Amino acid sequence: MKIRTLNMLFAATISVALLSNNAFALDCPTPQTGAEAGTLPQSAKDISETSTRLAFGTTGNAVNEVIFDLRKKYPKANEEEIINYLITAYCPVVARKTGLSADQATDELKQFSAQVRSLVEN
């Protein structure tokens, strides 16, 4: 899936499919090669490792530490690229949570993206 901006992320890649038993499947963005505008190179391993870091909490320093690491690794990365990277990593965390409705999962991703945007822009 292509990720160009945060708006496209929610419009195109964060979709919720209802299943027959009223459960849902969160369709998360896939790691990108970095060839597309608005993306950073992301291996499945990189995303998995970042997901694990974020799974232990998005409060406190976890998100700031990941942002710092991304800025260090990709000094020319723009805000949208960093935000998209973090959303790609955090979506599987939300997808693995049990007991969330589709609306709750979508709301959690929106809250996370707002948190990330605030941190990245400062």
Image (spheres, helix red, strand yellow):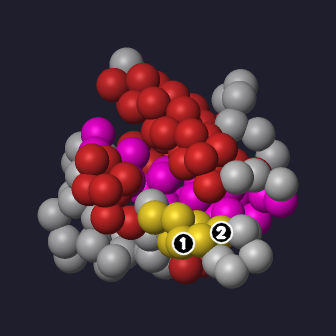
Which mark is on residue 56? none
Question: Quarter holding the N terminus?
Answer: bottom left
Amino acid at dot 1 = Ala
Q: Is residue 118 above or below residue 64?
A: above
For mark 2, what is the residue?
24
The magenta stretch spans residue 41: no
For disc 1, the neighbor class at 10 Å (few under 14, some 14 to 19, many from 20) is few
Element type at marker 1?
Answer: strand
Identify which residue is drawn at 49% across, 51% down.
86
Identify which residue is drawn at 65% across, 77% down.
19
Q: Nearer the viewer, residue 102 or 117?
A: 102
Magenta range: 79-98
Q: Position of residue 75 (x, y in %)?
A: 30, 46
Amino acid at dot 2 = Phe
The answer to whether mark 2 and mark 1 are in CB contact below 8 A is yes
Q: Nearer the viewer, residue 108 or 30?
A: 108
Q: Main secondary structure of the magenta part?
A: helix
For mark 1, what is the residue?
17
Identify which residue is drawn at 21% across, 76% down.
35
The magenta stretch spans residue 80: yes
- Looking at the image, residue 118 sits to the left or right of residue 50; the answer is left
- Looking at the image, residue 16 sits to the left or right of residue 83; the answer is right
Q: Position of residue 73 (x, y in %)?
A: 41, 54
Q: Is residue 51 above or below residue 2?
A: above
Q: Position of residue 114 (x, y in %)?
A: 45, 30
Question: Quarter holding the C terminus?
Answer: top left
For disc 2, the neighbor class at 10 Å (few under 14, some 14 to 19, many from 20) is some
